[in-house]
Image (tube, grey):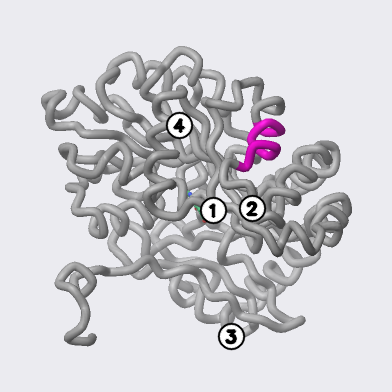
Amino acid sequence: MSHYWTDLVRRLTPYVPGEQRAGADVVKLNTNENPYPPSEQVLTAISNVSADSVRRYPDSQSIKLRESLARYHQVDVEQVFVGNGSDEILALAFMAFFQGKSTLQFPEISYSFYPVYCDLMNIEAQEIALNSDYTIPLEKFGSAQTSSDNCGGIIFPNPNAPTGIAVTREQIEKLLKENPDVVILIDEAYADFGAESAISLIHRYPNLVVSQTFSKGRSLAGLRLGAAFASRPLIDGLVRTKDSFNSYPVDAIAQAAGIASIQDEQYYRDTIGKICQTREATTKKLTDLGFRVLPSQANFIFASPGANGKGPNGRTAEDIFQSLDGKNILVRHWNKPGLKDWLRITIGTDNEMGRFFKAIQSLT
Ligand SMILES: Cc1ncc(COP(=O)(O)O)c(C=O)c1O
């Protein structure tokens, strides 16, 4: 605390990222990173970036990268925006579409950055409780629950985080049809792992924004690169906001690496396929051990130890988290109502999951 801080900064409760513990012995299953490296083509593109490219400012519009993304997703280049990680794109979208409007709706159990941005930007949040099976009750969003002028926007991840449960494109389309007057932002950070993307709907729904990231499916969390897809007027709104904040958010190295990663499609299909296989095997094994595991379409699973919150040898989620931590196996646990009986476990390699299960089975 410092008396130089503004009142707003005093009041903030910042987002707490998962621990980045280093060491050869650490099994990191706590921040939903990809356990496989980026493709060789990406690493080559990074090392081929010229001295001139880093001496100069990068292309502020990231045209080549946006063209690659536009071709890949069959949209126009004017319907693509890129940013320094999808977190930055979300922040710009909150500024461009939600700040100064009425309440922003999102699920009560969801990505914990949304309430942080609301506090930062003075946006009133309306958190909508999940169903008892942890699905998102989309019928309670938008004008369905409140009078339409009370809803200033809607955001949720698909699949949701930390549950991993996805909604269908058809459900999203219904929500868009029912709520044409507010921006609906679908955060597809984990869509590479099985959920239906809503990107194709941007051609018909001018109020839809879809954000994606290179951090998860494309193994580039350390590079900080994200993308958004929307109708041209919404992309123009993001560009106006970006250019009033930081006109060069995507550096020359990230632009080159992003293009190379889009070109090496087969590599990513293979690594994503392996992660999905390991996810299914992990789900089955944990279920056999008595855990309740939600059906995940992401690169993580949300698991609760036992029907009454007690796992192997009567251990609670917090106990298991602490024991694993002591063995340098990091998973995520939140000591908060609604979340304290659950662990979010990122899917690692088969080897890493082997170490995880050995540790789980050795709990005494
Ligand atoms: C739901 C969700 N959205 C967005 C992000 C941000 O990803 P990035 O800023 O790495 O693109 C994350 C990161 O974990 C996430 O879980």
Q: Residue 120 at x, y = what percent?
A: 26, 59
Provide the residue designation for mark 3. Answer: 326
Residue occupying the point 65% across, 27% down: 70
Helix, strand or loop under label 1: loop
Q: Amino acid at mark 4?
A: Ile
Task: Establish if 171 lies above or below 193.
Answer: above
Residue at image point 53% right, 48% down = 83
SS for dot 2 = loop
Query: Which residue type does callout 2 highlight?
Result: Pro
Which numbered disc, 1 or 3, marks the residue that appears first in the sequence? Answer: 1
Q: Name the residue tied to disc 4.
A: 235
Q: Which mark is first along the chain, 1 or 2?
A: 2
Residue drawn at x 48%, y 20% is 202
**Image mark for residue 16:** none
Confirm whether residue 213 shows in the render: yes
Indicate which disc, 2 or 4, sits on the residue closer to the N terminus: 2
The residue closer to the viewer here, 46 or 216, is 46
Crowd tier of the residue under label 3, counting other residues whose Cα lies within 10 Å: few below 14, some 14–19, many 20 or above: few
Residue at left offset 67%, top offset 59%: 56
